[in-house]
């Protein structure tokens, strides 16, 4: 049985990881400010390439790595990577991050440490991570107002270092039962590619809001850096609020209905973002908050439905979906920059992304066509990362316990 200290440390790690995950997008206006880093939109987008590559690798190989070196060591390695990224940011030599390794293990730990209340414990963890993602833009705005934006990476480094030092001394054993089934030698079934396509579309839509909202607010709507930070904070806050909300109202609004409706909510927000002009910064904050609601339940439901539908590969479903989500993340993270630098406005790019959201809406009907929906309440998730809370997976490194490093 896990101690109260271990449970508290895992929850604290979720909160801190949420802050770290959004530190780079939250500082987007700093990176592109000519008086600071002076990066072009292309350079800002390219900054996320290593994160995408490592996150995809961690999603596909993390389970095997955890089996070989233990969950605790993978978790500690993830914290160490996060510290390294913050130190490099402070050194102003490299601005690249990878938080993919630690977070998936947090969900494994919180489920095993709370066997009598798995759903509640995973929901608590993901709510804390969501709180962290919403706090990061607010903290950036506060530190910018104080005259030293780099106070956030300093704070993150101190918190991560404290977590690492305390975690090293704890046993953090996550012992589970027999392993769930992994893909057979025949590979992925044809229906998996519907889920993969949906995940790519979702990754593009989430990342447009998560990585480019700040620059759109300042360049397109004439917002201040503080208003841009509030827009990003509102987006991530509503991602978390939406996941809790849709889990709570599941008896009145089915998971299938939620899955079909939310992509078209995103269609509306992308169209609104595409037509908003100066000086409508306040309206921009509201629209990005609504976009967070539109994103909220889609990724956890994709994994949930996939595990129920494709039982032959249920052990690998979460990791595979997260890998394709990260592919979509990469397309939006470093694909938008060249378009913007080629004189395509961010508002126009947001408008075009409505097509991707509409395609995701159509895919939702094909995804849910053949199987009964699983309960969202049993698989709550945070922003960066989708997660499942089903304790039936007994492999400590089972990909079903994995989540997205963002949200």
Image (cartoon, rainbow, N blue to C red):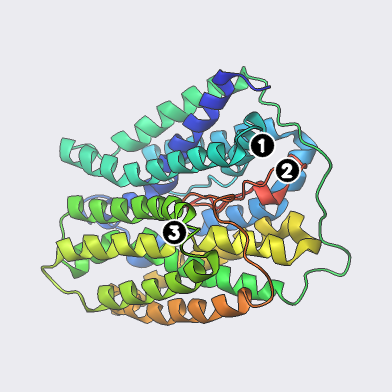
Image location of residue 108, percent across then percent down: 65, 39
Label 1: which residue?
Answer: 74
Front in this rendered view, residue 277 or 314: 314
At numbered mark 1, what does the secondary structure look like: helix, strand or loop? helix
Task: Tell me: residue 111, above or below residue 296.
Answer: above
**Label placed on residue 128:** none
Residue extending furthest right? 185
Task: Tell me: residue 68, above or below residue 58.
Answer: above
Label 3: which residue?
Answer: 296
Label 1 vs 3, first from the N-terminus: 1
The residue sitting at 68% across, 21% down in the picture is 171
Give the foreground label among 2 and 1: 2
At numbered mark 3, what does the secondary structure look like: helix, strand or loop? loop
The residue sitting at 81% across, 56% down in the picture is 182
The residue sitting at 73% across, 47% down in the picture is 398
At numbered mark 2, what does the secondary structure look like: helix, strand or loop? loop
Quadrant in the picture for the N terminus: top right
Direction from residue 51 to residue 112 in the image, left or right = right
Separation (CA) of disc 1 from disc 3: 27 Å
Front in this rendered view, residue 188 or 66: 188
Direction from residue 63 to residue 356 in the image, left or right = left
Label 2 CA crowd tier, 10 Å (few <14, some 14–19, many 20+): many
Q: Is residue 64 visible?
A: yes
Label 2: which residue?
Answer: 397
Q: How many marks?
A: 3
Image location of residue 73, percent across then percent down: 68, 32
């Amino acid at each position: 049985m896990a101690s109260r200290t271990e449970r508290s440390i895992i929850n604290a790690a979720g909160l801190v990881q949420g802050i770290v995950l959004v530190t780079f997008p939250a500082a987007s206006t700093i990176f592109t400010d000519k008086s600071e880093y002076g990066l072009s939109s292309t350079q800002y987008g390219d900054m996320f390439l290593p994160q995408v590559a490592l996150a995809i690798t961690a999603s596909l190989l993390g389970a095997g790595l955890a089996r070989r070196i233990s969950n605790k060591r993978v978790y500690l390695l993830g914290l160490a990577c996060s510290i390294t990224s913050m130190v490099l940011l402070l050194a102003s030599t490299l601005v690249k991050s990878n938080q993919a390794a630690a977070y998936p293990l947090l969900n494994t730990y919180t489920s095993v440490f709370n066997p009598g209340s798995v759903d509640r414990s995973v929901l608590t963890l993901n709510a804390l991570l969501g709180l962290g993602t919403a706090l990061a833009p607010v903290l950036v705005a506060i530190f910018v107002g104080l005259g030293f934006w780099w106070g956030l990476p300093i704070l993150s480094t101190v918190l991560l270092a404290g977590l690492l030092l305390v975690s090293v001394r704890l046993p953090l054993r996550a012992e589970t039962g027999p392993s769930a089934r992994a893909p057979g030698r025949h590979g992925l079934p044809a229906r998996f590619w519907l889920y993969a396509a949906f995940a790519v579309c979702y990754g593009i839509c989430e990342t447009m809001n998560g990585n480019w909202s700040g620059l759109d607010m300042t360049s397109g709507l004439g917002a201040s850096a503080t208003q841009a930070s509030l827009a990003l904070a509102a987006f991530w806050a509503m991602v978390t609020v939406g996941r809790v909300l849709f889990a709570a109202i599941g008896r009145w609004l089915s998971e299938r209905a939620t899955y079909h409706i939310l992509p078209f909510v995103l269609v509306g927000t992308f169209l609104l973002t595409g037509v908003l002009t100066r000086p409508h910064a306040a309206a921009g904050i509201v629209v990005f908050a609504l976009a967070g609601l539109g994103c909220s339940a889609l990724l956890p439901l994709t994994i949930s439905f996939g595990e129920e539908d494709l039982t032959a590969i249920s052990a690998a479903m979460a990791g595979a979906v997260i890998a394709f989500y990260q592919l979509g993340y990469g397309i939006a993270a470093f694909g938008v920059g060249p378009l913007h630098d080629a004189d395509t406005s961010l508002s126009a790019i947001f408008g075009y992304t409505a097509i991707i959201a509409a395609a995701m809406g159509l895919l939702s009907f094909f995804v849910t066509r053949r199987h009964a929906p699983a309960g969202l309440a049993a698989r709550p998730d945070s922003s960066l990362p989708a997660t499942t809370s089903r304790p039936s997976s007994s492999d400590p490194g089972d990909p079903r316990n994995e989540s997205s490093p963002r949200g």
